[in-house]
Amino acid sequence: MQDEYSSGVVISYDDKAGYGYISPDDSEVQGEKLLVHRKSIRDSGSLLSAGDRVVFKVSSVPRGLLAVDVHDELKEALLDTGLSSGKLVALKQDRKFGFIQDSVDGRIFFHFSQIVDTSKPLMVGDKVSFQKQVTERGLQAFQITLESNANVSKLSVEMTKLDYLAQAILARDSKRFDEAVKLYERGMVSSPSVQLVTSYAAMEKNRNRRAEALKVYEAGLKTFPSNIKLLEDIGLLYSATGNFKSAISFLRKGLELSKETGQGSDRRFLLGIARIYVKRDSNRDDLIEALRYYEMARVAFESSIHGKTAFPRDDLLSMGLAKIRLQHHRGELAYDFINNAGFRIIRASLFEQKTVGSDFVIEPLAPEILEGYGISGNLLLRCMFKSEISRSDIESIDEVIREWGAGGLIDEQVVLLLVSSLPEHVERLLYQRLEDRKRTVPAIVPITQSQIERAKDKSTALREVLDRWLFRRDLFAQNFPVSGRRFFGREKPLSEIRDAISNGIAAGIFGLRKVGKTSLLKEIERRAHEGGDIVVYMDLLRVPSDINDTRWLYWKLGSELYKRANRAEFKGVQWRLGGHYSDYLDIPADFPVATAFDSDLSKILDVIRKSHLNPRPKVVVMLDEIERIIPNSSGKEGFDGFFNFFSYIRGVAQESGDFVPIVTGANAAIAEAAQFAGKDNPVFNFFKEIYLPLLRYQESFQMINTLGRGMGVRFSSDVVERIHALTGGHPFFSRQFCSFICERHSNRPLSVSIEMIDELINPYLDSAGRDFREIIERFSRDYPEELNVCIEVAKAGGKINLSELQHDTAKALSIRHLVGYQIVSVDDNTISLTMEFMLRWLKNGEMSRG
C-alpha cells in the first residue's frame, strides 16, 4: 500500500492548525478518516479545502495510517488528446467510482466527482465523452459527459466510413507523425469531427508546434463555429503563445455561446479570461478586468452543482492579490517588492477593514535569506495602508504569528512590515522588542515605502534592512520555554515520549533546573497537536498561592479540555464543567467539580473510541513542575485530595489507552516513592521515567550555529566543541555563555574564536554565579544525595574512582540519577563531572559561600 497512490476527498482541513482529514476512495481503508498535516502535503504552501479531490500515499505509522505526499488529483500530466468516447461498463454506486471501456486504452477508471451533469443518471452501457489524464494511479477519465442520441447516431454513421481518427491515433502513438498528419488531414476533409480536431491539435501541441495547432483549431472552427470546446482550446492556446487579444476574443465568444445555449461552461470561460488579464498585467485596467471576471466566476461556481469550494485555489490567490493591488498603491508596491526580492507568494488577504492593510505569506526562494539569517520557513509580510502605526498594530502582528506559527505555516521569529514611514516612537518600540528577553515575540523588520522606491536592487535592499535589524537581536539571551524552530535536539526523549503517547503509557520527564523540561513539553504539545491529539498543558507554578487543593486543578483541566476539544468531531458533546465557569470563584461551593470533569472527559474519550479517525487522537494531559502539588521528604504537604486525584488519573489511564498523563519534575519522587507521609503513593512505579539529559555535541552545534546565524555570528566546530566542554551541553548555560560572548563583542558579522572564549571564562563565572547558586540550592532541596556526590567528585579534582562511592546504597542510586541527567559520566570505573563550568565554580569555593 505504501508504494501505491490512492485518491480521496478532503473532509476537513484547518489551515491555521495545519492538519485535517481525508476520506479515501479505496475499499481497503474505506470508512476511515486519514490524518493529513501540512508536512504531508507535496507543496507545503498549498491550501487544502473541504471537498478537494486529492491523490496521496497511505503510510503506516505507529498509531495507524497517515496520508502523505498529498496533492491535487487534477494536477497530473494531461494526455492532451482532446475528447474521447467510450461506454460505461461498471458503476460502483456505494463507492462512487466506475469504469469506461475505451477503444484505444481499454478499461479506464473514473470517480463520480468527474461527472459533469449529475442531474442525468448514468447507467451501464451509456455512451460518454471524456478526457484522459495520467495520474500516479494510472490512466483516469475526467469531465465525463453523457452523449446524446443524435451524437451516438452520428458516431455510428461515421464509424462506417474509413476511420481516419483511429488510424491517426495509432500512427501518432507509434511516433509516425508524418503519417499521422496525413491521416488527420484526410479526416478533416472527408469526415471531420470535434474529437478529430482536438486530437490533431493536441498532437501538434505536444510536438511543440503551436502555430500548426492554431491552424488546426482555426480549420475546425470553420466547420464547427459554435463548438464550445474548440473555442476554449484555441483561446487558451493563444494565451500560451502570448497573443492575449486573440485569446480573450475567442474565450468571450465561447462565454456568450455558453450563456445562450445553457451548456454550463460559463465558469471555465470566466476563469480563463480572468487568468489572461492576470497574465498580461500591463496596466491597472487589466487588474480591474481580472477581478471583474473572477467575481463573476465565483458567482458561477457558487450557483453550480460543484459549489464554491470547487473554485481553484490558485485563482483564489490571484483574485486576492488583484484586490490588494487595486486597494492601495502600497499593495502594488508590496507585490512588486516580493516578486523581485526572491520570494513566492503563497497566501494573500486584505484586512477585514480593507483600507487598513493586507497580509502576505511568502516563501523565501534565495538560499542566502534562509542561511544568512537563520530563517527556516515562510515569512509573514504585513503591508500597512494607513499612514500612522500604533502599538496595537504591532501587538496584532503577535496574534497572527501565534495563530499561523502554531500550524507551521510561517516562521515565528521574523516578520516583515511594510510601512509608509518609520516614526521615532515606532522605531524605538521595535528595538525594545528585539531586546526583550522575557517574552517570545517575533522580530519585526520594518521596510519603508521610500526604501523600496529608491532601491535599484530589491534583494540588496532587503539584506541591508535585515542586517540592520536582525543582527541587533540576542537570540541566545531569551530566557523562556521554546518550541518549533527554536527547539533543538532531544531526539531520544522526544522519541520515547512519542512512543509512550502512541502506546497509551503514562510518562514522567525528570531533569535539572533550566535543562529544558518545559521546552520539551511545549515541543511535544506542538507535535501532538499537529497529529490531531487533544493536548491539555498545565504549568503548576501558575497555580495561585492560596490554592492548596485539587478542586482548582479539576476546574482548570476541564476549562482547557473544553478549549482544546473545540473541533467538529466533538460538537455534540454536552459539557458539565468545561465552558460553564470562566472564573473559578463563580463555581458554587457544593458543585461536584471532580465528577463534572470526569463526565466531560469520559464523553470525549467515548467520541474518540467510536470515531473512524486514523490515527485515533489521544487526550494528553501534561502537568509541569509536579513538585508544586506533591508531598516531599522534607515535610511539605501536598495538595488536599492529591491521593484521590492521582488515583483517578491512574484509573482513567488504565481504563483507556486514549488518555495519556505526562508529568515533569526535578526528581522522580512521584514515581519512585512508595509512600508519602505514611500513605501509599497511588502512582508508584506508574510513570515511565524519562531523564532529560544535557545536549549532545551535535545538538549543541545545531543550536549554537542556528541561533548565531540569525545574529550574524559564526561559531566554528572547534569553538562549539570548547563551549560544549565548558557547559557539558546544558542548554541554558550554553546559550547564556554565547550571549555573554556576543555582548562583549558587539561588532557584526562576528566570527568567534577560541581566544575569545578563554578570555571570557572567569568574567562569565563571576556574572553567572547567581544561576549556578540557584542550581546548587535546588540540588540541596531536591537532590541532597546527588549534591553530595558532585561535591566529592569536585573535591577530588573532577574525577573519582567509582568504587569509592558505590559502597553507599543512597549514593549508588544518586549516581544513576546523575548519569541519567549527564551531570556525571562513568568510564573505566571512573566518575567525572561533565560540566567544566560547574567544576570550576565549585572549586572556587562558591558552594561554601552559597
Image: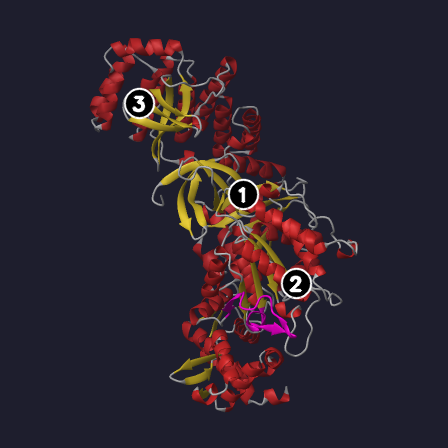
The kind of secondary structure element at disc 2 is helix
Q: Position of residue 161 (x, y in %)?
A: 25, 10
Q: Residues within 10 Å of mark 3 (few under 14, many from 20)?
A: some
Q: CA distance from mark 1 to mark 3?
A: 43 Å
Q: Position of residue 257 (x, y in %)?
A: 48, 15
Q: Position of residue 384 (x, y in %)?
A: 64, 47
Q: Residues within 10 Å of mark 2 (few under 14, many from 20)?
A: few
Query: What amino acid type is highlighted by mark number 3?
Result: Asp
Q: Residues within 10 Å of mark 1 (few under 14, many from 20)?
A: few
Q: Which mark is residue 644?
A: 2
Locate the C terminus and report the quarter of the image it occupies: bottom right
Q: Residue at x 51, y 69 (%)?
A: 692
Of the two numbered discs 1 and 2 in the rendering, the one whose residue sits closer to the viewer: 2
Q: Which numbered disc flags the more N-terminal residue, 2 or 3?
A: 3
Residue on which the image places disc 3 = 102
The kind of secondary structure element at disc 1 is helix
Q: Which residues are magenta?
A: 665-692
Q: Position of residue 741 (x, y in %)?
A: 54, 75
